[in-house]
Image (cartoon, helix red, strand yellow):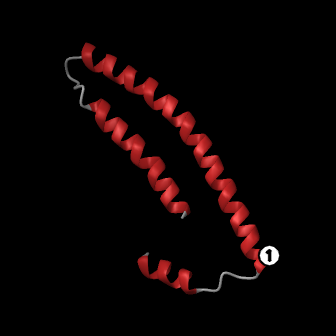
Amino acid sequence: MYIQSVWVRKQSAGTEKMQSISKSIKEGALAFLNAEYRLLLVFVVIASGALYGISTMVETTSWLIVPAFVVGAIFQPWLGILGCE
């Protein structure tokens, strides 16, 4: 994958019109991701509360599922934005 990434980066970016279209697509994608991640934040807060409540009621679970869930929820958007760069 790294070799393909290096090869792609060495290629021409195209004409000015192609670069303008590419920039518009990237801006639109990042705007969509930011809106999606704000909604994800609300879901993470609600789901974390529910997971904590369940973990206190059920003896076979642990409260540690909450930080594990939150860490996963933090890395997912970060990697999504990193992929757009």
Residue at position x 66%, y 81% from top?
A: 13
The quarter holding residue 23 reads bottom right
Q: Nearer the viewer, residue 60 or 28?
A: 28
Q: Residue at x 59, y 45 (%)?
A: 34
Name the element at disc 1: helix
**Residue placed most toward the observer, 72 or 12:** 12
Q: Residue at x 48, y 60 (%)?
A: 82
Q: Is residue 32 above or below residue 18?
A: above
Counting from the top left corner in percent of width and height, residue 41 is at 49, 34
Query: Where is residue 52, by image quadrant?
Result: top left
- Judge whether 68 appears above or below 75 on screen: above
Q: Seen from this angle, which residue lies furthest right?
A: 17
Disc tally is 1
Image quadrant occupied by the N terminus? bottom left
Residue type beneath disc 1? Lys
Which image quadrant for residue 45? top left
Dot 1, crowdedness within 10 Å: few (<14), some or many (≥20)?
few
Which residue of the protein is positioned furthest toward the left in this rendering?
59
State the residue position of label 1.
17
